[in-house]
Image: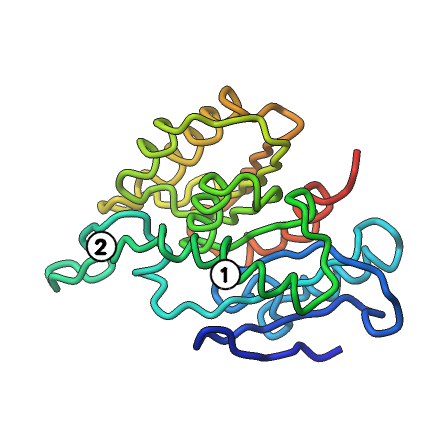
Amino acid sequence: MQPIVEEFQNRKLTIYLPEGYYQSEERYAVVYLQDDGDLIDPKDSDVLRKSRELTATNQLPGLLFVGIESFDRNDEYTPFVSPNIFEPGSGKQFGGNASVYADFLANRLKPYIDSKYRTLQEREYTGIMGFSFGGLISVYTGLRYPDVFGRVGSFSGSFWFPGIVDWIEQLTIRDTGQRLYMNLGHAEGSGRTNGQQWMVPNSKRVYQYLLQNGFHEDSIRQVIYESNFHSFDLGVQYVPEALQWLFNEE
């Protein structure tokens, strides 16, 4: 089944319906994906095929995926204004408009999708995921709106970003029944001299803090795999197992 490409508030959406969507009246859990849905885009990986195979064998519920185009990921996916380390000396900055983007996801996009498609609207059936900055904004949005996004996935999330650890550690986190999956390479950022050198220690610190505040061993999982660099190809391999853990009832 080919994805549906549509536009909402001048932003492209790529929507992957579950197999059999038009042949049933069933309602489905939804996963909102950053970066135009790159985590499941068939041109980038076989994640969508594997996920549908898991659904066909009753190992994963049917899922509706919504890939969201970013206007400017360095602006929308970053929680705070900060010098752009990717272009040192340029004077460019990360825009720090994550709060605006998160509000768009929770209060405009989700109601739109729920009104147009047969969705299960409760938080336990609503996921948000992304890679790198996409993982960072997914966790940020999930923690800001725990009553909206009950299933959160971060793949090599950019927790090196200045100020994000402090922001998380200042939150009062309720046990809402959220589940959070995080992964990263064991030595991502090693050898870097910029802020990315804090990738692994900051990710571990975020995990430990959340484990002790509002989450527990059954609701947060961190997977660390062998890699000394930031790899989409390696990180994305864990998406099917993450979806199973996030959405399968226990």
Q: Is residue 146 above or below residue 86?
A: above
Quadrant containing the C terminus in the rendered view: top right
Number of residues whose C-alpha sits closer than 10 Å to that of mark 2, classed few (under 14), some (14–19) or many (20 or more): some
Looking at the image, which residue is at 67% across and 57% down? Answer: 30
Residue 78 percent across, percent down from the top left: 33, 52
Relative placement, left or right, of 164 versus 36 is: left
Relative placement, left or right, of 91 versus 135 is: left
Residue topped by disc 1 = 108
Residue topped by disc 2 = 85
Residue 233: quadrant of the picture: bottom right
- Gap in angstroms between the C-alphas marked 2 and 1: 31 Å
Element marked by disc 2: loop
Relative placement, left or right, of 106 versus 151 is: left
Residue 85 percent across, percent down from the top left: 22, 54
Say which of 110 and 185 sits in front: 110
- Which amino acid, by three-letter code, is at mark 1? Arg
Residue 209 percent across, percent down from the top left: 45, 24
Q: How many marks?
A: 2
- Which amino acid, by three-letter code, is at mark 2? Ile
- Residue lying furthest top: 212
Element marked by disc 1: helix
Residue 220: quadrant of the picture: top right
Say which of 54 and 120 sits in front: 120
Quadrant containing the N terminus in the rendered view: bottom right
Looking at the image, which residue is at 65% across and 61% down? Answer: 114
Q: Is residue 25 above or below residue 142?
A: below
Say which of 74 and 111 sits in front: 111
